[in-house]
Amino acid sequence: MSRIKGKLALITGASAGIGEACAKQLARDGANLILWARRKKRLADLASEITDESGVTVDIASIDIRDHELVFKEANQLRVNGLSPDIVINNAGMGAGMSLMQEGKVEDWNRMIDTNVKGLLFVTRAFLPDMVERDHGHLVNIGSIAGRQVYPRGNVYNATKYAVQALTEGTNLDVLGTKVRVSSVNPGLVETEFSLVRFDGDEARAEAVYEGLDALRGQDVAEVVSFVVNAPPHMNVADVLVFSTDQRSIHHVHRNGS
């Protein structure tokens, strides 16, 4: 039995990868959806697919979470329309480049910090007050093993994911005394568009990241998210770390032939 059937879940970065998989999984769990991403056409196609398959309601909006005015404006409009979400999945995130710190590009740093940290903050600030006021709600931040262990040339990306972990833990303390739950789900290697974006569309370089191993898929992470949000109301699954069986830490990966 699904505990989130009929609830309203908002997912950022929902047009691909983990966000898309979460949308499909939570719809199968019976949740109605609000999907945010920059690529509206992909959102529209996904919404149509989900509606046909699951019969839940799906609202979409083209939102760049780096734009705090747009985030707050859209959140307020949802509130006016009686659509304050019960669940918010802060999934939108990205990596840009793999430069040494001394060779890093400021534009890459800004993109990662503005999306992974400030965007998450804006979305959290937009919806968490309603949850606290209602004494009900669940905030789920999609982090990464990169927020636990650093790796060469990961510097600023690592820093953003360490920030996500700190913000999750800090928010949990801030809502103590309410029934609002705050969770983080931290995957290892997941085969999505992440590396393609990180390497500016270089398909060969992106594919090499996952070569020779059976990496996680977006659906694997979505199933973990489903477990987290379906936990009994008195249970807060504060922190989950998940790898494929071919990975045991950020530095320990088994590849075929290795």
Image (spheres, rainbow, N blue to C red):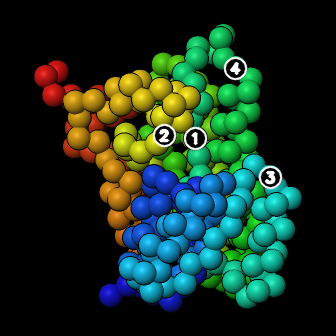
- Dot 4 and dot 1 residues touching (CB under 8 Å): no
**Tag 3 residue:** 67
Res 107 quadrant in image: top right
Q: Which residue is mark 4?
A: 105
Residue ID for mark 1: 94
Is the residue under label 2 in contact with that under label 1 (CB below 8 Å)?
Answer: yes
Q: Badge 1 local density, few (<14 within 10 Å), some, or many (20+)? A: some
Disc 2 and disc 4: Cα gap in Å?
A: 18 Å
Check the picture and name the quadrant holding the C terminus.
Answer: top left
Q: Is residue 156 above or below residue 248?
A: above
Give whichever of discs 1 and 3 has the lower sequence position.
Answer: 3
Q: Are marks 3 and 2 in contact (CB under 8 Å)?
A: no
**Residue at figure coordinates x 52%, y 66% from the top left:** 45
Q: How far across and down, in percent of the image, does residue 236 sit? A: 48, 70
Image spot of residue 131 (x, y percent): 68, 77
Give the structural element (helix, strand or loop) at label 1: loop
